[in-house]
Image (cartoon, grey):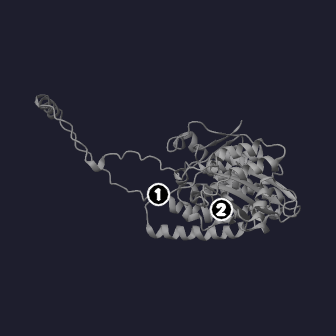
Amino acid sequence: MALVIHAGSTNKNAFKTLIAAEYSGIEVELVKNFQMGVSNKSPEFLKMNPIGKVPVLETPDGPVFESNAIARYVTRLKADNPLYGSSLIEYAQIEQWIDFSTNEIDTNVNRWLFPRLGSVQYNAQVEELAIASLKRGLEALSIHLAKNTYLVGHSVTLADIILGCNLYIGFTQIMTKSFTSEFPHVERYFWTIVNQPNFRKIIGEVKQAESVPPIASRKPAQPKEPAKPKEAKKEAKKEVKKEEPKPKAEAPAEEEEEAPKPKPKNPLDLLPPSKMILDEWKRLYSNTKTNFREVAIKGFWDMYDPEGYSLWFCDYKYNDENTVSFVTLNKVGGFLQRMDLARKYAFGKMLVIGSDSPYKVKGLWLFRGKDIPQFVIDECYDMELYEWTKVDINDENQKERVNAFIEDQEPFEGEALLDAKCFK
């Protein structure tokens, strides 16, 4: 008998188990056609969990409920699972962060979100306390993540899976960019976690909430009109037949649906035309295999238009954190993934430098316009993690540094090049 988890396809508590199963190589099936409020009230479901809460895992040895317990069970099915760490202290720390995630993050997100969705009665004082408690938890989490890519050790553990799923509801439902920007290390952590392949396979693409849900209004139920006697109904029908048909009354103007507004154009699309065609530069870069300086770099400067584009150096602010090579590479890879929103307007090179830790992360970016686009600053939280310096193309030393970035020069500024990544 295969393991079957009973929950809806968008249930973040079921995601915990499904993601843990992906990491562990354990087969867990999501039950088909699950309907919340129907399936979990059936006699069969109530035999597995008498109070009807989801998710429930159906196993050959009997059912398991409570989402964290289910995720732990599936993780333990694999012997020496790295999701549980490699030592007793790591195991304890993983359990510690699972409890923290539940008590400090999930509980307070729910206390803020559910009243606004109308699930429970809204109370302004309760909401204020929930937000304050959530901020306290996120601040504590941010302090830890300032020096750690993951919660425990140097790779994803069960603690990251459970915290990632709990943060998922907050980020996608109520925690807007203006709220989470107070906690840049939490932002960096969350987007790193949800962009891991095993997460993306289960939860798909993640988009942050753009606004806090309005407080749901609770309208009292309208009393039903008493049924009319049958004779009265017949008389009414006769009268209707005799009456002249009336034209339909027009709906009041304020009740008419507003026509959908056209999507506003990106401000960069409204800039004056540029002599530099970004796609032509990207093709030249990609197709040049030999004589790179003579062909690609010379071609770049021939194309470059300082009136329509700008060049920027970036330096990572927290290089002392970059003590593990693959974690540093993943960090840069995540940044480039999140920059996808700017692909039409940008070209970038990111270098990871050094033969030993801590590794340095530096980059060169070409943006449409004379400044870094505001929508990139607003939407890609990684921008805050770098120092940005505009290139002065009248300075020959800076121009030569641009050339070194474009061609992945090694050694780069006297140091070994660990890796080079291109955004195009």
| Tag count | 2
Residue 339 location, x and y as percent?
65, 53
Query: Would residue 206 be found to the left or right of residue 364 on screen?
Result: left
Q: Is residue 7 visible?
A: yes
Q: Earlier in the sequence, mark 2 or mark 1?
A: 1
Residue 9 location, x and y as percent?
59, 43
- The local secondary structure at tag 2 comes to helix
- The local secondary structure at tag 1 comes to loop
- Determine which residue is flagged by label 1: 213
Residue 293 location, x and y as percent?
81, 50
Q: CA distance from mark 2 to mark 1?
A: 27 Å
Q: Tell me the tag on residue 383.
A: 2
171 is higher (above) or lower (below) than 7: below
Asked if the residues shown at circle 2 and circle 1 are in contact, with their CB atoms under 8 angstroms apart, the answer is no
**Quadrant the N terminus occupies:** top right
240 is higher (above) or lower (below) than 318: above
